[in-house]
Amino acid sequence: MHAILWSFGFFMLWKIPRCNEIKDIENKKNISISVIIPARNEERNLVKLFNSLNDQTVKIKEVILIDDNSTDRTSAIGKEYNASVISLKSLPKGWVGKSWACYNGAKAAIGDYFIFLDADAELNNKGIENISSCLEKYKGVISIQPYHRIKRIYENFSLFFNIILVAGMGVFTPFQTGIKPIGAFGPCLICRKEDYFKIDGHKSIKGEVIEDIEIGKKFLNAKIPLYCFSGKGTVDFRMYPGGFKEVIKGWSRSFSGGAKSTSIPVLIMVIAWIVGAIFPLNLFVDCMNPFILNIFLTAIVFYTLFIAQIYWMSYRIGNFSFLASVLYPIPLAFFIIIFFYSLILTVFKKRVTWKDREIRT
């Protein structure tokens, strides 16, 4: 039975396609692209993003930075890099900040295609080229989860959040595109201008905390195909570089809310897999008093299997430390604690705080 639970991990993340795996498409350089960047107090991230945009092999029609009432140099940095800057001074009632920023950027954009990029993203120099190839081949909405770049030890606590976030989309199983995703990845979303306004864009999900999942649903309900990819080789990001407290705030903001959007079969597999990962820890406890060799050896075997599997998962979605896989019970315990903390905030208290704003859930 526990071997079956372990095998669920391979089933959920059987294959994660990447944009840079697509062969060159001749017409990709003719695609008219507007890059739209919603930003609130992002001065520490924007320089890297703008430098990566300037280093692209494919020309970008325009870059639009939407400054969502920042108190730092967000707007000034955008102007220094010759981006079109839209400054928002207020947030209308009923809107969440990111959706409001994205919608204003889209209304001002003139490109045939929109790329919505989070400010902490950074493109590979062939990033736009890879994305353009995706657009030419798949003719729909492209959703990319950036490759997670780890620089400090504490960032490895995001290990299980990243694995489960990607697996929860439900499209990386052996069935691949035969199953529709539950929504979109938020940090990098690409669509045609006409498709965006066909669903009324971010206005249609203006009050949703988990805007990426909800706008993905809108595209799917409108019969617009949605494809999910890994960002490895195309777009990276570094999540929550501001310290351990930022990791807690970031993941507790909405993670438990995303669980309700996950399909029941995938949710069951995720829960079963987590239970399976806890199993060898229970065996270690059971065999100690008194010591039972057979149980101890079984615990060693299953613990080793989970280490190997978790590392196999993690290296495809981020440069997580191998030690994080070896010591996986620690980030797993952190995941469980923050998940239930997020549940308290979003379901019972019905409010979370992000970017110095309180958001009603």
Image (cartoon, helix red, strand yellow):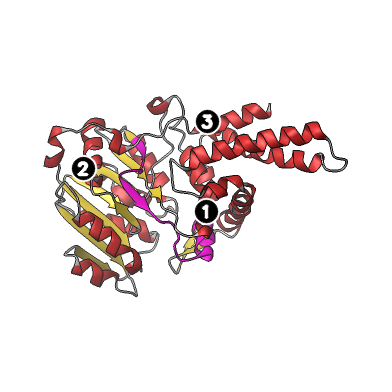
Label 3 CA crowd tier, 10 Å (few <14, some 14–19, many 20+): some
First to last magenta residue range: 227-254
Secondary element type, mark 2: helix
Percent from the top left, x then y, of residue 331? 59, 51
Residue to which mark 3 is pinned = 10
Query: Residue 17 falls in which quadrant of the image?
Result: top left
Secondary element type, mark 3: helix
Residue to which mark 2 is pinned = 129
Residue 36 in view (yes/no): yes
The amino acid pointed to by label 1 is: Asn
Query: Residue 297 falls in which quadrant of the image?
Result: top right
Q: Of residues 327 and 65, which is closer to you in this image? A: 327
The amino acid pointed to by label 3 is: Phe
Q: Residue at x 33, y 35 (%)?
A: 226
Which of marks 2 and 3 precedes in the sequence? 3
Q: Residue at x 16, y 44 (%)?
A: 112
Percent from the top left, x then y, of residue 345? 57, 58
Left or right position of 276 against 218: right
Task: For the residues labelled 1 and 3, say whether their Cβ atoms are less than 8 Å apart.
Answer: no
